[in-house]
DNA sequence: TTCTCCATTGAATGCTCATTCAATCATTTT
DNA sequence: AAAATGATTGAATGAGCATTCAATGGAGAA
C-alpha cells in the first residue's frame, strides 16, 4: 500500500478510490435495474464520474461485475472468519457467529441481496461466481459441519447428523435471504435470525436454549 | 376455442402451439445463457422458428418473459393444489404433498431452477414476478401454515409455532433449490426431500417418523 | 515556472439487438 | 378454382450499448 486516500475533493484520485467508487455504484445500479439493466452509463452517472473511467480502471464491464461480486464475498467472509479461529470461544458460539454474519445489516439488506441474487441468476457469470463466492460458501459450510460435529461429540447428541444440519442450514440461510429480498414485509433480519435459532434449538436443545 | 391442435407436421400451427414452443425455447435459452444473454434470435433458433414469430405471437420480448414465468408458476402450483383440498387426506400427508411438489423432477431440475433464479435476480421483472408466482408463493405458505396449525392442534404439540415453521419451510425450500442449482454435486432432489423430512420430524416427531 | 506523467473526459465507432413490415406461403371459405 | 384469411419469413430499421481514443486537466518533479 502506498498511502491513505485523500479526503480532499480533488478532480483526480488514486486508482483504488475510483475502483471502490465504481464498485459501490455498480452495486447500487444492479440493485435498482438488475444486471441486464446495468449499463456503464448508469454506473458512471451513479458514481458521478465520466463514462470512460470504467474502461480505464477495469479491464472491461465483465471485470467490473466480477470484482463487484468478489467485493461482496470478501465483505461477508470477513464478518465471521476472525472469530471462528479463536480457541477461547466454544463451538456453539462460533456457530452463532456465522449465523449473525449471515443476517448482519452490512450484508443482509435489500440493496446487497439484490446483487447476490442477480449473480445467482446469471449463468454467464456462474464461472466467475464459483471461483470467488462459491469458494466462500463451501468454506462456510465446511466450517458449520465441523462445528456441528464438535457440538454433537461434546454433548453426545443422538439422531442428528452434522452434514445434514450444515446442508439444511445452508438452505435456510439462502432461502431466508431470498424471502427477505422478495417479501420484506413478511421476512426480516431479526425474525430470520430467530428462525435459525429455533432450528438450532430443535437440533441442539442444550446449546441453544 | 376453435378445435384441437393438429398432430401433423405442418408449416403453420395454431397460435397456442407456437406460444408453447416459444415459451419452452425461452426456458431453455435462459437456462443456458441467463436472462441478459437471451435474445429473440437465440429463442427462435432454439425453437426452430423464424425471428419474426415472437413479435407476432407475443406483444414484446418482455411479455414473452413474463408469460414464461407464469407458465412455470402454474406448472408448480398444479402439482399440489389438487390433493390439498381432498377431505380424505390428513394434514401431515398434505404437507408431504407440498414438499414433494417442491422437489418434483418436473419443477426441480437445473433447467427450470435456472429460470426461477434468473427472474429472482432481475429487478426489472420483479413486479411481474410478484403478480404471478409471488401470489403462488403466498398461497403455498398460507397453506403450510394452516396445515401446521392443524397438526399442532390435533396432536397437542408444545413449543412449536405454525407461522414460524411455515416461514422456515419456505426458507428451506428456496435455499435448497438454490443449492441444487449452484452445487449439484453436493445437493440433489432426493437428499433435499429427506432434509425437509428431517426438519419436519424435529418439529412433529409423531407425524413424520 | 515549465515539464512530465497520469487521470479524466466524452464524442466517435462499430456492434448487437428488439421490433417492424412487405412479401410469401398454407389453409379455409366461397 | 379463386378468393380470403391467417401464419410465417427474414431483411431492414433504428435504438442502445461497450469500448476506444485523441484531447484536456491537474499535480508533482525539476
Image: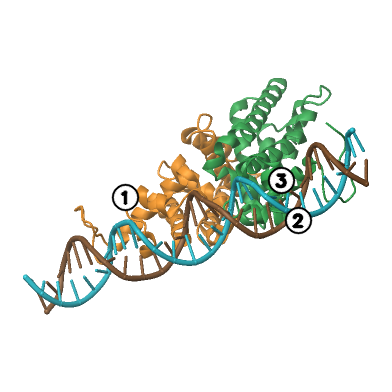
Chain colours: A orange, B green, C cyan, D brown
The image quarter containing residue D30 is bottom left
Instruction: Look at the picture and state if B200 lies above or below A67.
Output: above
Whether callout 2 and callout 3 share a subunit is answered yes
| Residue appearing at x 19%, y 53% in the figure | A8
Q: Nearer the viewer, residue B32 or B180?
A: B32
Q: Which residue is mark 2?
A: B48
CB-based contact (under 8 Å), mark 1 and mark 2: no
Instruction: Look at the picture and state if A29 lies above or below B91.
Output: below
Q: Which residue is mark 3?
A: B23
Q: Chain for mark 2?
A: B
Q: Which residue is mark 1?
A: A48
A131 to the left or right of A87 = right
Position of residue B55 measured from the top left corner of the image (x, y, whole percent): 66, 45
Q: Which mark lies nearer to you, 1 or 2?
A: 2
Q: Nearer the viewer, residue A170 or D12?
A: D12
Instruction: Look at the picture and state if B61 lies above or below C10.
Output: above
Give the secondary structure at mark 3: helix
Give the secondary structure at mark 2: loop
A121 to the left or right of D25 = right
Q: Chain for mark 3?
A: B
Amino acid at each position: 500500500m502506498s498511502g491513505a486516500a485523500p479526503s480532499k475533493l480533488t478532480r483526480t484520485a488514486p486508482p483504488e478510490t475510483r475502483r471502490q467508487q465504481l464498485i459501490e455504484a455498480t452495486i447500487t445500479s444492479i440493485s435498482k435495474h438488475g444486471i441486464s439493466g446495468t449499463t456503464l452509463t448508469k454506473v458512471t452517472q451513479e458514481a458521478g464520474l465520466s463514462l470512460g473511467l470504467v474502461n480505464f480502471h477495469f479491464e472491461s464491464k465483465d471485470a467490473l461485475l466480477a470484482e463487484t461480486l468478489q467485493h461482496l464475498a470478501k465483505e461477508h467472509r470477513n464478518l465471521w472468519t476472525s472469530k471462528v479461529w479463536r480457541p477461547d470461544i466454544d463451538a456453539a458460539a462460533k456457530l452463532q457467529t456465522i449465523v449473525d454474519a449471515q443476517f448482519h445489516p452490512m450484508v443482509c439488506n435489500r440493496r446487497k441481496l439484490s446483487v447476490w441474487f442477480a449473480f445467482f441468476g446469471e449463468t454467464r457469470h456462474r464461472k466467475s461466481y464459483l471461483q470467488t463466492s462459491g469458494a466462500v460458501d463451501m468454506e462456510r459450510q465446511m466450517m458449520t459441519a465441523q462445528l456441528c460435529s464438535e457440538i454433537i461429540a461434546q454433548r453426545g447428541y443422538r439422531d442428528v447428523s452434522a452434514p445434514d444440519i450444515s446442508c439444511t442450514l445452508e438452505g435456510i440461510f439462502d432461502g431466508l435471504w431470498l424471502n427477505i429480498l422478495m417479501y420484506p414485509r413478511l421476512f426480516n433480519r431479526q425474525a430470520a435470525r430467530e428462525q435459525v435459532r429455533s432450528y438450532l434449538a430443535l437440533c441442539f436443545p442444550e446449546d441453544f436454549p
